[in-house]
Amino acid sequence: MNYSSIPIAQSVVLLCLEKGVDHVVISPGSRNAPLTIGFTQHPDIKTYSIVDERAAGFFALGLAQQLQKPVAVVCTSGSAVLNYYPAVSEAFYSDIPLVVISADRPIERIDIGDGQTIRQRNVFENHILYSANLYSEFVAEFTIEDSKFNQKQREATKHNQQEINKALNEAIVNQGPVHINVPFYEPLYNTTTKRLVDPIIVDKEVKIQELTTEQLTPFAEKWNAAKRKIVLVGVLQPDTIEQHFLDQLGSDPSVLVFTETTSNLDHPNFFTRIDNIIGSLDATGFKALQPDILVTLGGMVISKKVKAFLRNYQPKEHWHVDPKKAYDTYFCLNKHFKVPVNHFWKQFLANTRVQTENEYQHYWLNIRERRDLMHKKYINEMPWCDFKAFDLILSRLRPKSMLQLGNSSTVRYVQLFDIDKSLKVYCNRGTSGIDGSTSTAVGAAVASSLPATLITGDLSFFYDSNGLWNQYIPRDFKIILINNSGGGIFRILPGDKSSNAFETYFETTHDLNASHLCAMFGLEYFYADSEVSLAQAQEDFYRETNKPALLEIKTPRTVNDEVLLGYFDYIR
């Protein structure tokens, strides 16, 4: 096989492969040619070509989300690397191992007026686990016969391999983004059939902190004494928590388990729609719900209502379980158990007892049942709107499939419904941005064996339209686009909705539709603008075709906020 003739490029490629980084997303350029040659020529590495670096970053993030291991992105020098930043920040807050490998000019060529040259070293320093700034190495035929010079070259190679090892180890062990910045001298395109480097492999030991009975006893005693406990679960990968632990929690009358759509957990006694419970409570209701102990698990929590509730009605104890980090979201965190969640529950639940006479869970399950009845009644009475569209969409999703959600209104609407528990649900909730929902979903669909559906809003979809600019979209990939002609979520927020400034600078109204984008990128296009037409369109949309499909659902721009805000008053 052919290698780049530049040793530093060989070191990057071979060490990536040794560490299991065998999926690489490459954006075109010249300065990164040595890396492109090395990755694409290796038979054990799967490579993807995506022009737009922002889309490429999120595509790689979607791959890593599903593969559960690091995926690399490779770009040329200059502003190209900056376009990865949205995906890097998402990976940082979502604990996804993304390896950014940027080509660069040698250090002495920075800030002298060369094109495609910026200050790339440590460019992601606020949102990165590790930045490996490599040293330049001359191509072999340009080296001089000087022992001191060759010694410097050997030192540079050793430094580079150590830095690459550190970066990749951080991505693997601590699950997050890392940056490897690789400066290259020209020529860039020369190849060789010889391996010029023998990579040094340095692994990082993974240590799991053990919890002793002595450490757990005071917390177990508090748990056993508490009459009201809430376990709140944020974003989790499917099948993260062993089901028998969930069953123990769900059958404890003193425990409420609050989950979200992105928690990917299931038990008949869990409260899967937090806002349906909290959104209609008054002060008396909040005091009745207020927990003595709050245990939080997983990543970011979507519900603003539960955040407001727990900040205003704080528990006496807040414990978070995560081997890496704990956010003081509710301003009352007093214990961080730095262990894997299954490790915690195995040891902790063995020291607890069930309060069989407690009515806490039973009381709120009755509230949930009444709210569910009012939920169905309200949907039957509402006019055509986003809410109605989501009810119809979610009832027809393919079972045992992957559901990717766009941010803003989309993920919040889905939170109000009890969806099929066989679905695997994902959303970019690390930074909650709309930039990259489509690209992430496409990358995830490529890496998964499950058929995938993306539900997204119009601003998110059009903002990331380059997410469709690639040749890898599976033919069974489905996009459901809710088009209400603007940023509908801003109509729900406080403020004057009648001014031109609101429509232009907040709601950002538009008259766009997706038909031309579908024609350009080769997607089959379907359209609906009423309950009747949506029912028919869904029949055709889910038929097996030879290419991916998009269903655009047109909803009114000014009705949705009234219906949604009225929902919480109605179900009370």
Image (spheres, rainbow, N blue to C red):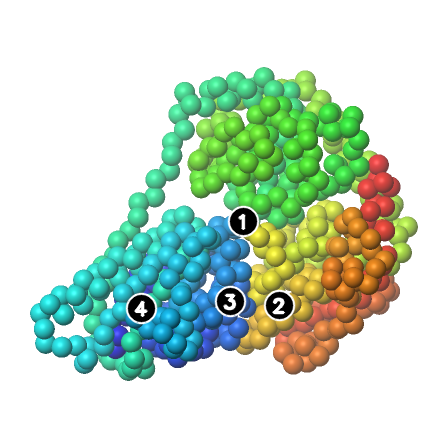
What whole-number distance in Å separates the C-alpha atoms at marks 4 and 3? 21 Å
Kindly identify which residue carries mark 1. 237
| Between marks 2 and 3 in the image, the one whose residue lies nearer the viewer | 3
The amino acid pointed to by label 2 is Asp
| Residue receiving disc 3 | 83
Quarter of the image holding residue 168?
bottom left
Residue 481, percent from left and from top: 72, 65
Nearer to us of marks 1 and 3 is: 3
Q: Residue at x 51, y 75 (%)?
A: 51
Q: Earlier in the sequence, mark 2 or mark 1?
A: 1
Q: Earlier in the sequence, mark 2 or mark 3?
A: 3
Question: Up-down: is 25 above or below 424?
Answer: below
* Marks 1 & 3, CB-CB < 8 Å contact: no
Query: Of callouts 1 and 4, which one flags the residue occurring earlier in the amino acid sequence?
Result: 4
Could you say whether the residue bearing mark 4 is in a helix, strand or loop? helix
Residue 537 seen: no
The front one of 314 and 122 is: 122
Q: Amino acid at mark 1?
A: Gln
Residue type beneath disc 3: Asn
User: Viewer-nearest of labels 2 and 1?
Assistant: 2
The image quadrant that residue 512 belongs to is bottom right
Q: Which residue is mark 2?
A: 464
Q: Quadrant of the N terminus?
A: bottom left
Going by the numbered disc 4, the residue's amino acid type is: Ile
